[in-house]
Image (cartoon, rainbow, N blue to C red):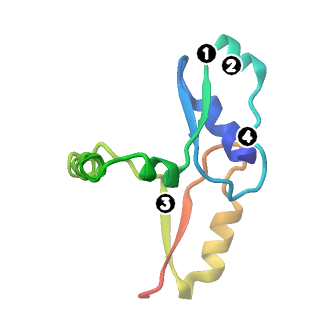
Amino acid sequence: GGESAGLLLKLLETGGTMVTYGGMSGKPVKVATPQLIFKDIRVVGYWHSRWMAQRTPSEKQEMIDALCQAVLDEDVKCPPAKTFGLKDLQMALRWQSEQSASAIRSKLVWNCQE
């Protein structure tokens, strides 16, 4: 929801579908009417507990197998990230503050082993 959903919607191609499955921001998903009409965008919700309740054990295993294969085939892409050690706190916070608010931001990941 919120601002991040709006940014993702702008990246969808014509006929694309955005699936929302969490409400961590607590803000509603806002969709501009032109995106729905002219780009034929669909917005749907997903509730994992319901999906699990409606599937047989073999269907669940098929999904796990398909997801594992997608990872092995490198079809799953991770969002951009930059890793910092905890000792580099000031540098990490400065880097994070320089991230653009109008684009998809890289995630800051803490390496707690350093």
Q: Is disc 4 placed on a helix, strand or loop?
A: loop
The one nearer the camera, 88 or 48, is: 48
In the rendered structure, the answer to whether residue 23 lies left or right of residue 20 reads right
Q: What residue type is labelled 4?
A: Val
Which residue is tagged 3?
A: 81
Quadrant for the C terminus, please: bottom left
Q: Where is residue 13 in the image (x, y as percent from the top left)?
A: 53, 22
Q: What residue type is labelled 2?
A: Leu
Q: How far apart are marks 3 and 2 (CA)?
A: 31 Å
The one nearer the camera, 61 or 38, is: 61
Against 110, residue 32 (above or below) is above
Q: Distance between the residues labelled 3 and 1?
A: 31 Å
The one nearer the camera, 58 or 63, is: 58
Which residue is tagged 2?
A: 36
Q: What residue type is labelled 3?
A: Ala
Which numbered disc, 3 or 2, marks the residue that appears first in the sequence? 2
Q: Position of residue 84 (x, y in %)?
A: 51, 75
In the rendered structure, are the residues bearing label 1 and label 2 in contact, judged by CB atoms less than 8 Å apart? yes
Q: Is disc 2 placed on a helix, strand or loop?
A: helix
Q: Is disc 1 placed on a helix, strand or loop?
A: loop
Residue 97: name its quadrant: bottom right
Q: Counting other residues with Cα less than 10 Å from the Cα at mark 4, is it few (<14), some (14-19), or many (20 or more)? A: some
Q: Position of residue 70 (x, y in %)?
A: 26, 46
Which residue is tagged 4?
A: 29
Q: Counting other residues with Cα less than 10 Å from the Cα at mark 3, is it few (<14), some (14-19), or many (20 or more)? A: few
Which residue shows up at 53% across the image and 18% down it? Answer: 15
State the mark number for residue 103.
none
Which residue is tagged 1?
A: 40
Q: Is disc 3 placed on a helix, strand or loop?
A: strand
